[in-house]
Each structure stands twice: as structure tokens, then as C-alpha cells.
Image (cartoon, grey):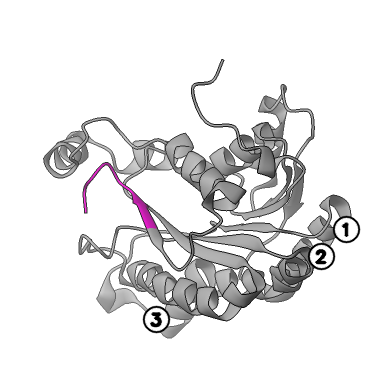
Amino acid sequence: MSNFAHYPSLAGKSVFISGGTTGIGASFVEEFAKQGARVAFIGRNAAAAEGLLAELTTISRRPLFIQCDVTDTLALQAAIARAREVNGPITALINNAANDVRHNTPDVTRAFWDNAIAINLSHQFFAAQAVMEDMKAAGGGSIVNLGSTSWKIKQAGYPAYATCKAAINGLTRSLARELGPFNIRVNTLTPGWVMTKKQLEQWVDAEGEAEIERNQCLQNRVQPDDVARLALFLASDDSRMCSAQEYVIDGGWT
């Protein structure tokens, strides 16, 4: 039996998750599905999505996967329309898709910069735009924008990514004010260094472990499902008076 919270308000809720095929996003898909939500998720990696779905053997309602590149705004809008058609009006949006590919300032071209903005920031706005009428008609909803502590800790090696993640706080606060009269809540969920497969394979070496030990107050490691459980709260009615805020889950690093 799970020691973690169950949220009755998530049962049957139509939830849309971007970047849901791997890492933190895959944990979002699994945890929302366990709550009985009607989950739709998008991503580019169809093979990873099928692998994830094959693992969800105890889930009574199979999540809907739609292959989509979030930099294609028309495709993103079409995916949201398809999710609405299958699962009903969307009342919880988890804007998770991102790419933290490393890059050096002298090497950044205008095309690279524009693509980084599209992957890490623009889709969050256009997804929110595409679901806001659903939420207005439903009498409310929750939008969760994924941030990052990378810019807070002055992390070098991906200036375009860090810029986008900093900008998400501005997007969240602006949308929260605009949509608040319709009972639509908008918050930023900001993970620290999360032990995803990608991070463990590419970056969490002995030096990385030592950095975590030095900087986190809590000496455990942040796992994808830790982040997902915070997203569950923010999407549920339990957080009904939480909006325009940033919720950081980083073991006390920042």
C-alpha cells in the first residue's frame, strides 16, 4: 500500500502532459494515471512511449500517446484537440517538454537560439493558450509550467536553456493574473537535479555526487516521482488557492 497521497479530484480529470515519454515526464504520466486521471501525453519518441505504456500494467485507463514535436505549434494544437476529443475538455496541463542540451556561448547561432526558445519556452505559452477555453468552460483548471534551478545556481554550459527556464516564472505570473478571474491556477514547478536515466548516464559522476552532497540540505537524491507527486498536488483541488507561485523541489539546494 502506498504511503503517498491520493487525490479524489484527479479521478476522471482530463490531463495533458508534454514531454511525457521519458524522465520526469514519464513519471508524470504514470502518477497521474495511478490517480485515475484521463491522461494524454506527447513526445517525439514513440518507442519510449510504447515502452512506458507496456509497463503500466496495473492502470485501468490506458494513457493516450500522441507523437508530436512541441516546436511545431500547429501539431501541438492538433494534439491538444485530439486529447480533448478522446478524454474530454482539458482541465490540467503539465508543460514539461524541454531539452537541456549543452552549448557554449561562442557556438550559438540564431537558428540554434530560436530552436531552444521553441523547445523550452514557446510551447508552454501555446499549450496554455490552447486549453484556456476548456478551463474557462469547466469553471477552473490548473496549469503547471516546469522550470529549473539551473539559472538560480548560475549553471554554465547552456545559456539558452537557462534563459528559457528563468523566463517561465514571468510567463506563469502573467498568465496567473490574466486567468485567475476564471478560477484557472498557474504555477511553476521547479526541479533541482533529478536522477533521471539521462542524468545518471551523462552527468552524475563522482564529481556530480560530491556537488550534490555539498549543496543539498537533504542528502537523499531527488527522484522523478518526487517531482510528479508535487505536480499531482498542484493539479488537484487541494491546491485550489495556490497560483502565481514557484514550487521548488531540489533537496534544499537553492
Q: Position of residue 167 (x, y in %)?
A: 40, 75
Foreground disc of the pair 2, 3: 2
Q: Are marks 2 and 1 in contact (CB under 8 Å)?
A: yes
Q: Please, is residue 146 above or below residue 75 in the view?
A: above
Judged from the image, the secondary structure of the residue bearing numbered disc 2 is helix
Residue count near mark 1 (Cα–Cα under 10 Å), binned few <14, some 14–19, many ≥20: few
Judged from the image, the secondary structure of the residue bearing numbered disc 1 is helix
Residue position marked by numbered label 1 in the rendering: 85
Asked if the magenta segment contains residue 250, the reply would be yes
Separation of residues labelled 2 and 1 (CA atoms): 6 Å
Residue type at the position of mark 2: Ala
Separation of residues labelled 1 and 3 (CA atoms): 39 Å
Q: Position of residue 213 (x, y in %)?
A: 15, 36
Kindly identify the residue that appears in the image at 76 percent across and 63 percent down: 80
Residue position marked by numbered label 3 in the rendering: 109
Magenta span: predominant SS is: loop
Residue, far right: 85
Residue count near mark 3 (Cα–Cα under 10 Å), binned few <14, some 14–19, many ≥20: few
Q: Is residue 223 left or right of residue 184?
A: left
> Is residue 222 visible in the rendered structure shown here?
yes
Residue position marked by numbered label 2 in the rendering: 81
Residue type at the position of mark 3: Thr
> Is residue 47 visible in the rendered structure shown here?
no
